[in-house]
Structures are given as structure tokens and as C-alpha cells.
Image (tube, helix red, strand yellow):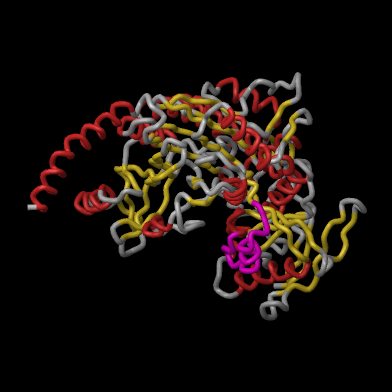
Amino acid sequence: MKKLLLLGLVLSLLPVVNLEAKTNKRTAGKNSQSVFELNVAHINDHHSHLEEEKMPLKLDGKTVTVHIGGLPRVGQEIKNFRKNNKNTLVVHAGDAVTGTLYYTLFEGKADAELMNAINFDAYTLGNHEFDDGNKVLGAFLDVLKIPVVSSNVVPDKGSILEGKWKPYIIKNIGGQNVGIIGIDVVKKTKESSSPGEDIKFLDEVETARKYAKELQDKGINKIVLLSHAGYEKNVEIGQKVDGIDLIISGDTHYLLGKEFEQFGLVPEAESYPKKVNSPNGNPVYIAEAWNYSYLLGEMKAKFDKNGVITELTPTPKLLIGDDFFEVKDADGKAVQLDEKEKGKILNSIKNNKNIVAIKNDPALAKLLERYQKEKTELGKRKIGKITEEIPGGSDNRVPSEHNKDGSFATTLVAESVLYKLRNTGTGNVDFVIGNAGNVRITLNPGDFSYDLAYSLLPFTSNTVFITDVTGAEVKQILEDAIDYVLNGGSTGAFPYGAGIRYEATKEGTLGTRVKKIEVFDFKANKWIPIDAKKTYMLAVNSYIAKGKDGYTTLGKITAQKRGNDTHLSDTKMFIDYLKEKKEIGKPKSTNVIFKY
């Protein structure tokens, strides 16, 4: 009897509970007491990579080269994201520019127009926005029509950049106010870029704290930090500053999430996003979306009535095309998959939440096509003049009987990089080392065009990496590279440099071949022996910085997080160098004496 009475009591209460739930849902849009859902999509560091690119991925058990990224594809996925979700926020965490011929030729105008068409809700400045000074940045921002936020970059009164951005914006989303603060990386912008003297840079943590409090004082309890301060600094901000809920990170180009290992990729950290606790114990989530428009970060965050995230569902997605799937046949030749195999791959992608195969947004593709045509024409335009033959390319990588000096072109590129770095920011780089395989052609006398620059240095993802090294480590770096060349590795590893010269022999073993190293003392204007115990600043390209081409010691150094990727393109550095010099001849020496 008691059981029947209890059952009747429960049944009598059910309609009341359901009614209460319905009442809460009805008031969710108006009442701050209800749960609020925010759907965030983001990119960072697209670096003028406007077109799709090719990349090998592991798909359905095969290594398949696909088309990946491109802003028209990003635009289509964002359109789908907005259509399929309520309360959306779409943001860009900086470094929109610098990195391809699109920026070299159009100085950000092409990037700005495509970003306008995507219609980001907010965008923050990165360090590379300042690469060509205030004037070029100002012109880019004049074309850009989306909200720009940056709280720790403060132009002086009267600066041409005054009033071009705000510290933060407050956006009403689904009836709720969301604060979006912008932050830029300070040290790297000041040291490796070219901001005007009339721009002040403020501490990232303190500035984030100041504006988070200002927003909280205005009654806003949902705060997104759009921060180009880099992943590690953003983790620090999350742990030190109260009031911030989400940090959308840029600058470090990190792929986050072990789920991407299934595609043959190597993520920097296991989780997307990373969760930390602020000083008051509330959760803060830090997310970064790799680089070059390859990936769109996506998150669904649920906030309680106090503006604390109680639930977060991440679905970051690689963005690939649906019509290009290339594999190697038995003879090693690249071939397209047949329709049956292609169908199997597309089906596996359809069932995977971390990758999507989609077409480009038609309007964005048409807009990009206009710039592609212009790029083709402008690519033929003269930059400067080459006055004599400068040997480079695969035939001249290693000094030999037919060319005792080796690759003058590699030395010339190293000289252009050193010149640029010593005349940018603090200019504290001592020397540059480069691998011969990075430089693909011999330069012939005559006019030199933009197209030729990208034939000379075609690896657009190659950027300049700066790290501290001891003199002893420099010797080991050179030893590693030479040993790799002589013991079955690529001849492209052979090292050349600027601000550094050395003598080595073919005979010997690892550690015994390099006989003499000298570095150039810029103050004394003379060559001096390298000091094994002294610390120097070395610049290399990002490929060998990772330990590729046999540069094992260099890889170990960078794995210790001792250096920084400037994300400056060596191709653009060479273009700027030739523009300034107008005419270039063969360097006096390759800075290498190699007894073969």
C-alpha cells in the first residue's frame, strides 16, 4: 500500500517538474539565471596562406595527399558553423599577414578582403602585423572592416595608428553580453618586428587583469581573451587572472589534441583545449588552432548563471577538399585514387568529428581568384638585378672538384637573412646557418622577379628560427650536418652561413671533421675565433631547427624550448634585401673551406 501511495505521489509531481523545466527554457534568452550556451569558432596565424595547399595525411589506413586549408574553405566551414549552431562567436587570434606572395604583393589587402567576407566577430593584432611598420599596418586596417581588439598595444596621441583598434568589445550574443579582450605578444613584436617608436607595449598578464576587472565591474561575467601572446603565456594568464573564461590563443602555431595523431600529425599538447584554474578556482580553457588556415577550432561552452563554464564540448576540425586524393603507386608515382577508394575515404571522414571534406565557399573563391590572376601578372614584375652567375641548386650543394666553393646562392640567402635580422628590432643575431637544400636554383645574370624568388626559395612554410647556442654547440651542429651528408643522408644538409665561416675535411668521423670556426665581430669589424664557452644568437630555417636533414644537435636545442620561431619568411627577407640593394652579385666567399 505504501509503495502504491509513493508511486501516486511521484506521478502527481511529474507534470509540475516538466512545467518548471519548460518555464526555465522559455526564459533562457532573457534571464541571466539560466544556462547560456556559447559556440566559438576560431583560427590564428593564417599568414597570408589564402589558397589551399597540399599535405599528406593518414586516412583510412593510407597515406593520402589532400588539399587542405585556404580561406575560401575556412569561410565555408564557418558558414556551416553559424547555420548549425546558436549563439556563435567567430574570432581570429592574429598574424593574418606575412608568409606568402599574396602579402609581398598586396601588403595585406587580399587578406583583409577575404577576412571581411568571412565576417569575423573580432580579430586581434599579432606581431607580424608590424613587420613593415605603422604605415603598411594602417593601410591594411583601413581595408579591414571587422572589429579589431588589442589592449596592450597603445599608440601615442597623433600616431597614424591611433584609434584603429579598441582594448575590447562587448558583444550581445543571444541576449547575453560577452566581453572580448585583445592581447598581443610583447617581447617578440619589439625584438623581431618593426613597430614605430610611437607604439607602447604593455605587459600581457597585467593588461589582461586590468581589462578583465573593468569588464566585471560593468557586470559582464562571460569574458573571452583573444590573445596572440603564445600558448605558454596564455596558460600563465589563465592561471593568474580572474574573470576570464576562454582564451583563444595565437602566435605559437600549436596543433592541440592527441586526436590528430590518427592523421599522422604530431600535436604539441594532448588536449584541445587545455583546462586550467584561475586564482579563484574557476575553470579557464585555452585553445589554439594550428596555422595557415588548415584547421578550424570549434567549441560549445555552457555557462551557469554566474558566468562559469560548467560544460565544454570541443570539435576542432581539419579542413580538406573533397575532390583531390593522391597516393603513390607501386612505382612511386603519384596517382589519384579511383572512385571506389575515394568513396571509402570520404565515408571514413564523414564519421570522424575532427576532419571535414568540404568545397570552397563560392563567393570567397571568386574573390580569391581575382587576386590569383593579379598575382600571376605581378609575379613577373622585376624586383632587382643579378649581376653575375651565383651557383646554387642541387649541382652545387657540396664543394667538389667541379666547384670548390659550393653553393654561393645559399650563402647569399644567409647574408640576406642576417642583414634583415640585424636591422630589425634589437638586431642581436650573431650569425646564420642554412642548409644548401633550402636554396633550389643557380641565379643567372639579369632581371630578378617575384616568381624567381619563389623558385629560389619555394618552401613557403619555412620560417626563420632564432636560438641561443654555445660555441661548442655550433661546432657540433656543423659536425652533424656534414656527417649526415657523408653517410647516406641528403647532400642538401651541407651547411653554409653568414657571420660565420669554417674549415672542414671529408676525412674523419663525427666530431672530428670541423677544424676551424670563426665568427664576425661586428663591433670590431673583423673575424675572430669562436669561443666554445660563449653564448651566441643563431638564426636558422625552421626545417633544420626541428632537427631535420641530420641537424640532430639543433633539434635537441629547440626541443628544450630555448629558441623562438619568428615566423618571418626567408623568401620575403631575400626579396626585401634585393629591393634595397637593387643589384646583387656573387658573395666574396661561401664562408666554407672543405677539403674533399
Q: What span is colored magenta in the figure? A: 546-564
x and y, in percent, of residue 471 in the image: 78, 66
Q: Residue at x 76, y 24 (%)?
A: 156
Q: Is residue 181 above or below residue 387?
A: above
Quarter where residue 327 is shown = bottom left
Can the viewer see residue 527 in this picture?
Answer: yes
Q: Residue at x 65, y 71 (%)?
A: 480
x and y, in percent, of residue 254 in the image: 52, 50
Q: Is residue 253 left or right of residue 328?
A: right
Q: Nearer the viewer, residue 281 or 452?
A: 281
Q: Nearer the viewer, residue 485 or 139?
A: 139
Q: Residue at x 55, y 23 (%)?
A: 144
Is residue 547 magenta-colored? Answer: yes
Q: Is residue 492 left or right of residue 27?
A: right
Is residue 371 magenta-colored? Answer: no
x and y, in percent, of residue 70 in the image: 43, 38
Quarter where residue 554 is shown = bottom right
